[in-house]
Image (spheres, rainbow, N blue to C red):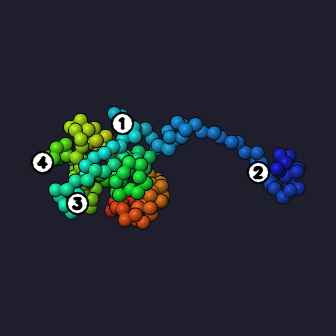
Amino acid sequence: MPSIYASDRLSEGMPAEEPVLRTLVTVKREDASVWARDGPLPEGAEEGMSGWLLKQHQRVPGKWGKRWFSIDDRKGRLNYTHREGSRKVRASIPLQELSVSTTELSGHGHCFVVSCSPLRLVLSAWSEADQTRWVRNLQLRVDIWKEKVLAEGPRVAHVLEFDCASDISDESKDSSVSVSQSPTGFR
């Protein structure tokens, strides 16, 4: 181990001003999750929003598939997979570009539409309360992320672009969809 004395460090070829001893910081798990999130959740939003929804198939309008949806508050994205806990993301939609609205479909209740051009997802919740919960939580986050982009501009875009790069490369290998049609450079 190198000496902490400046004279010894100079003889070892190390600059005297370079610190030899480093502080070790331990972060508790609950603190780390707060640090990972970029700012507080919108007031009234549920933390860790995720769950099963039915998604109408794009090519066969009468057919529905059960999908696991989750909101990534740190990256500002809505993701869905085929299975809960799967790392194979089928679509990852930036919240600041998303629009959400309720809709009525004959033969299917509790529907709402999530869209981010060119992607349009028709979703169905299990109950009216669940539909309201999803629409409300998505809209709260959409509003916050739109404000963040306006306020922080390129800084947010830059951070998200690099933060999402590994997710996008994994998605392309798995023939997944990522919405990247954005004038701000989000992926």
Q: CA distance from mark 2 to mark 4?
A: 71 Å
Q: Which residue is mark 3?
A: 58
Q: CA distance from mark 3 to mark 1?
A: 29 Å
Q: Secondary structure at mark 2?
A: loop
Task: Say whether disc 3 or disc 1 marks the residue closer to the N-terminus.
Answer: 1
Q: Which residue is mark 1?
A: 46
Q: Nearer the viewer, residue 147 or 164?
A: 164
Residue 92 in percent (x, y) is at: 36, 55
At 50% from the left and 40% from the top, the residue drawn is 33
At 41% from the left and 61% from the top, the residue drawn is 171
Residue 181 in percent (x, y) is at: 33, 62
Q: CA distance from mark 3 to mark 2?
A: 60 Å
**Residue at the farthest top position:** 44
At 23% from the left and 58% from the top, the residue drawn is 57
Q: CA distance from mark 1 to mark 2?
A: 46 Å
Task: Say whether disc 3 or disc 2 marks the residue closer to the N-terminus.
Answer: 2
CB-based contact (under 8 Å), mark 2 and mark 4: no
Task: Say whether disc 2 or disc 4 marks the residue closer to the N-terminus.
Answer: 2
Residue 124 shows up from this direction: yes
